[in-house]
Image: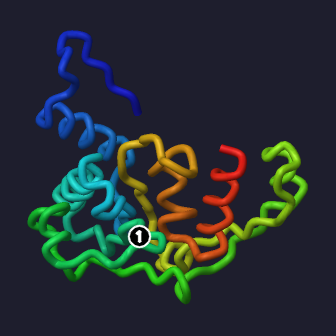
Amino acid sequence: MLYLNLHDTDGLNLTVMKAHFYEALESIGKRERILLIPPDITRLHGLGGLLATWAVEYYKDAVKAILPALGTHVEMSPQEIDLMYPNVDHSLFVKHNWRDDVITLGTVPPSFIKEVSEGKLDFGWDAQVNKLLVEGNFDLILSLGQVVPHEVVGMANYSKNIFVGTGGSEGINKSHFLGAVYG
């Protein structure tokens, strides 16, 4: 959802932002088992942690797990969790293990990679995600965060939270390689 406030040249203040966020969550409706996928501490200033905190406040006990989109980054420390997700129960946080906790949903064919890279690369790409997304029996998975430029793969958050942040080494490495080679 996109919200525009023509009267505030400094952007949305947090009170207005929270109200719009709650409105968006209300439009989704009641849920029983929710997985939140926010960015990790490397994206602290994008307010994804605040969105996750608000989602926990809104949905309460329906939030069953929070899987920070670590990719190959180091697991967040308790102090980093407190900084990024204030007052959120640490027991909700699940560590993403990009080596062992992934499943392959399908494969992007080499012909597509070759086409989008204008012939510079020619390999298949396994679309991998953390198995919790498939096996966790969630009725809502929220990928949270600000869509911002990424130095290698183009844009951060949105689908990058899923396929890179919760993906395996092949998906992470090949997507970054494609971005580095083709841009």
Secondary structure category for the residue under label 1: loop
Q: Nearer the viewer, residue 132 or 30?
A: 132
Q: Nearer the viewer, residue 70 or 136?
A: 70
Rendered image coloring scheme: rainbow
In the rendered image, which quarter is residue 171 located in? Answer: bottom right
Q: Residue at x 21, y 35 (%)?
A: 17
Q: Residue at x 11, y 63 (%)?
A: 86
Left or right of 145, for residue 77: left
The relative height of residue 65 versus residue 139 in the rendered view (above or below) is: below
Q: Nearer the viewer, residue 22 or 36?
A: 36
Percent from the top left, x then y, of residue 33? 37, 70
In the rendered image, which quarter is residue 22 located in? Answer: top left
Q: Residue at x 26, y 77 (%)?
A: 92
Tally of numbered tags: 1
Percent from the top left, x then y, of residue 177? 66, 60
Percent from the top left, x then y, of residue 172? 59, 67
Q: Residues within 10 Å of mark 1 (few under 14, many from 20)?
A: many
Left or right of 179, for residue 18: left
Which quarter of the image is occupied by the N terminus? top left
The relative height of residue 128 versus residue 151 in the rendered view (above or below) is: below
Percent from the top left, x then y, of residue 154? 56, 44
Which quarter of the image is occupied by the C terminus? top right
Question: In the image as oriented, which residue stretches furthest toward the bottom?
Answer: 100
Left or right of 85, for residue 136: right
Q: Which residue is mark 1?
A: 70
The relative height of residue 46 versus residue 13 in the rendered view (above or below) is: below
Q: Residue at x 25, y 34 (%)?
A: 20
Q: Which amino acid type corresponds to the residue marked 1 in the rendered image?
A: Leu
